Amino acid sequence: MRIALTSSGNTSGSPLDERFGRAATFAVYDTDSKQFEFHSNTKGVETSGGAGIQAAEAVSRLGASKLVTGHIGPKAFRALAAAGVEVYTCAGGFTVAEALEELLAGRLQRAGSADVEGHWV
């Protein structure tokens, strides 16, 4: 299984990015290999609109079946749901590795809907 996490940097010790569409990086953890990959989200950061939908497409293309992020808007949430990606939100203050640990330990609850309005920064 592949798990995407929004990240402020390129290491598992980087802070979990609170934003989904405009997250700096997507960290993708493979539960089989126990390895992280880091993918820049430059397109989402620089776009004037539609960042959430673009990010949802990117996460889907990366093969993730689960996403951990701080917050997510309605359009991105619907796009991820349509792609079969489960969304989990995680309060601030966690690193990518800590947020992953929270998910794997079953301490994060699956989101049933968006938790912010669109264009949240």
Image: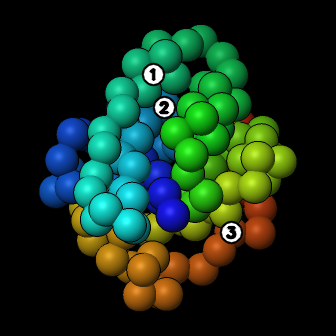
Q: Which residue: 47% across, 68% down?
A: 90
Quadrant hosting residue 109: bottom right
Task: Give residue 82's position: percent from left, percent from top.
Answer: 83, 48
Give the image location of residue 105, x and y in percent.
41, 87
Assign a secondary structure to mark 1.
Answer: helix
| Camera sees residue 93 | no
Q: Which residue carries the number 3 mark?
A: 111
Mark 3 or mark 2, earlier in chain: 2
User: Are the residues tagged 1 and 2 within 8 Å (C-beta)?
Assistant: yes
Q: Residue 102 placed where, x, y %? A: 39, 79
Looking at the image, can residue 108 be seen? yes
Answer whether labels 3 and 2 touch (C-beta < 8 Å): no
Residue 103's place in the image compared with 27, above or below, is: below
- Label 3, secondary structure: give it: loop
Q: Residues within 10 Å of mark 1 (few under 14, many from 20)?
A: some
> Where does the image place residue 11, in percent across and percent down from the top left?
18, 47
- Spatial CA distance of label 1 from label 3 is 23 Å
Give amino acid for label 2: Arg
Q: Who is closer to the viewer here, 43 or 114?
A: 43
Mark 1 or mark 2, earlier in chain:
2
Q: Which disc is residue 45 wearing? A: 1
Instruction: Please determine whether, in this image, residue 56 is positioned above or below residue 14.
Output: above
- Label 2: which secondary element: loop
Relative to 11, 36 lies left or right: right
Left or right relative to 17: residue 106: right
Q: As drawn, is 15 to the left or to the right of 31?
A: left
> Callout 1, which amino acid?
Val
Residue carrying label 2: 22
Local crowd size for mark 2, using a 10 Å CA cut-off: few (<14), some (14–19), many (≥20): many
Q: Measuring 59% from the left and 35% from the top, which residue is drawn there?
A: 61
